[in-house]
Image: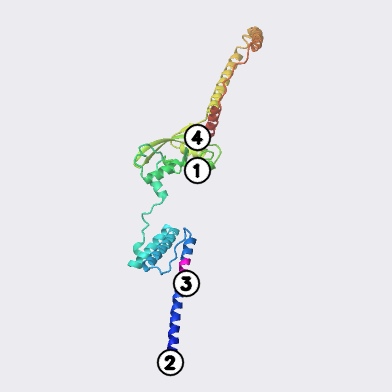
Amino acid sequence: MGHHNLEKMHGHGGYDSDFSDDEHCGESSKRKKRTVEDDLLLKKPFQKEKHGKVVHKQVAAELLDREEAKNRRFHLIAMDAYQRHTKFVNDYILYYGGKKEDFRRLGENDKTDMDVIRENHRFLWNEEDEMDMNWEKRLAKKYYDKLFKEYCIADLSRYKENKFGFRWRIEKEVISGKGQFCCGNKSCDKKEGLKSWEVNFGYTEHGEKRNALVKLRLCQECSFKLNFHHRRKEIKSKKRKDKAEKDSEESTHKKSRLSSVEETSKTKDKAHSSSVKSENSVNRNSDEEESASESELWKGPLPETDEKSQEEEFDEYFQDLFL
């Protein structure tokens, strides 16, 4: 009896436990459905999905490769050309073997920008020179366009051989006044007694003979060196020319007056009586001329004089300045 009751109790207890587990599973499934629905309602449009599982190995490897590529690109961009070159060489030697001596570059044929300009520079550029332009000629032409071609700088070290060197001025020389307000000889810095000269410069360039008229501003000593073999053409301003012409006219006028005075002094004794009469007539004529000139002043306004325009005044000013 006792054993039979225990079996009944045991069977009754097992039945009750199975019923309670089913109820518990139903409640947990309802809770999961509620949380999923709540997550769908609360999900934002830009929010990423939550992955409950581990990512696949291939996807993880692709992500790592992308990150490494970004980092490598960032470091390469931060380097300059030389650092990038050395890095690639070291990587090549690391993976494929070799020596750094095999990758060393010989600097015998290297050229700077100034070397290229010296090889392709021209004193004067013509239309024929600009026909076939490569990058070297374009660089030399660009340098030529920045030069100031009003006055030249001269090299007079070989003046006894009748050999001269000329070049155009650069910006620093224009600002300092070298070649215009200071002697144009490269080894002279005098600022007094400057003269302007026009020289027919004959030179050979790239196997061609050419001529060009250039202007120079030189002191007295350097002018002597320039005109050592034959005299060059001196350039003078209009005011200086007018002054020289006036001085020459005055000198000729003085000479004529002196000659006339000498002649009159010789004939003074012979024609003394006639000179007295002539003086009286001259005085009368001068009085009549003065009265006539006074009467003409009241006839009308003074004649108009031609006034110079502003452009003409500027042209005269700059002409005197450059010469």
Distance from the alpha carbon under mark 4 to that under mark 3: 113 Å
**Horizontal side of residue 273 vs 236, given as left or right:** right
Distance from the alpha carbon under mark 1 to that under mark 2: 124 Å
Tell me the SS state at disc 4.
strand
Percent of width and height locating residue 186: 49, 44
Q: Where does label 3 land, which residue?
A: 27
Percent of width and height locating residue 221: 51, 39
Q: Where does label 4 land, which residue?
A: 196
Which mark is first along the chain, 4 or 2?
A: 2
Which secondary structure type mostly characterizes the magenta part of the structure?
Answer: helix
Circle 1: is it few (<14), some (14-19), or many (20+) Cα within 10 Å? few
The amino acid on which the numbered mark 4 sits, given as a three-letter code, is Ser
Q: Tell me the tag on residue 3.
A: 2
Which mark is first along the chain, 3 or 4?
A: 3
Residue at 35% across, 64% down: 92
* Callouts 4 and 3 close, C-beta under 8 Å: no
The amino acid on which the numbered mark 1 sits, given as a three-letter code, is Glu
The amino acid on which the numbered mark 2 sits, given as a three-letter code, is His
| Dot in front, 4 or 1 | 1
* Callouts 1 and 2 close, C-beta under 8 Å: no
Quick check: 79 above or below 206?
A: below
Tell me the SS state at disc 1.
helix
Residue at 39% across, 67% down: 60
The amino acid on which the numbered mark 3 sits, given as a three-letter code, is Glu
Q: Which residue range is magenta in the image?
A: 26-35
* Callouts 1 and 3 close, C-beta under 8 Å: no
Distance from the alpha carbon under mark 2 to that under mark 4: 145 Å
* Camera-side residue of 113 and 318: 113
The image's colour scheme reads rainbow
Tell me if residue 38 is in the magenta stretch.
no
| Dot in front, 1 or 2 | 2
